Amino acid sequence: MREQMTPGQFLDVVWQAEFKRRVDRAFVHLTVARQRE
């Protein structure tokens, strides 16, 4: 029994996933840059 997602809910889920992916990438980038010093 799957609930039908509205376009707004779908966009919210996609946006959150993209946001998390970018934050994770930025965090890794900062960590690597800090280790090089």
Image: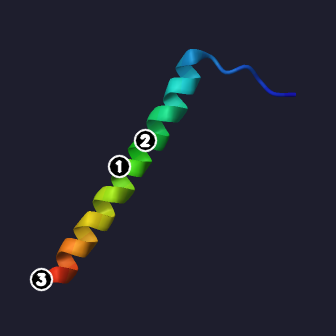
Label 2–label 3 contact, CB within 8 A: no
Q: Which mark is residue 12?
A: none
Q: Amino acid at mark 2?
A: Glu
Q: Amino acid at mark 3?
A: Glu
* Residue that badge 3 annotates: 37
Element on which disc 3 rests: loop
Task: Please determine whether, in this image, residue 32 is positioned above or below residue 26.
Answer: below
Q: Mark 1 or 3 closer to N-term?
A: 1
Within 10 angstroms of label 1, few (less than 14), some, or many (20 or more) residues?
A: few
Q: Mark 2 or 3 closer to N-term?
A: 2
Query: Label 1, label 3: how many angstroms apart (C-alpha)?
Result: 23 Å
Identify the residue at horizontal 32%, vertical 66% (top origin): 28
Label 1–label 3 contact, CB within 8 A: no
User: Left or right of 28: which side holds 11?
Assistant: right
Q: Position of residue 29 (x, y in %)?
A: 26, 65
Query: Label 2, label 3: how many angstroms apart (C-alpha)?
Result: 29 Å
Q: Which mark is residue 22?
A: 1
Query: Label 2, label 1: how many angstroms apart (C-alpha)?
Result: 6 Å
Identify the residue at horizontal 12%, vertical 83% (top origin): 37
Label 2–label 1 contact, CB within 8 A: yes
* Residue that badge 2 annotates: 18
Task: Please determine whether, in this image, residue 15 is positioned above or below residue 31.
Answer: above
Task: Please determine whether, in this image, residue 5 is positioned above or below residue 17.
Answer: above
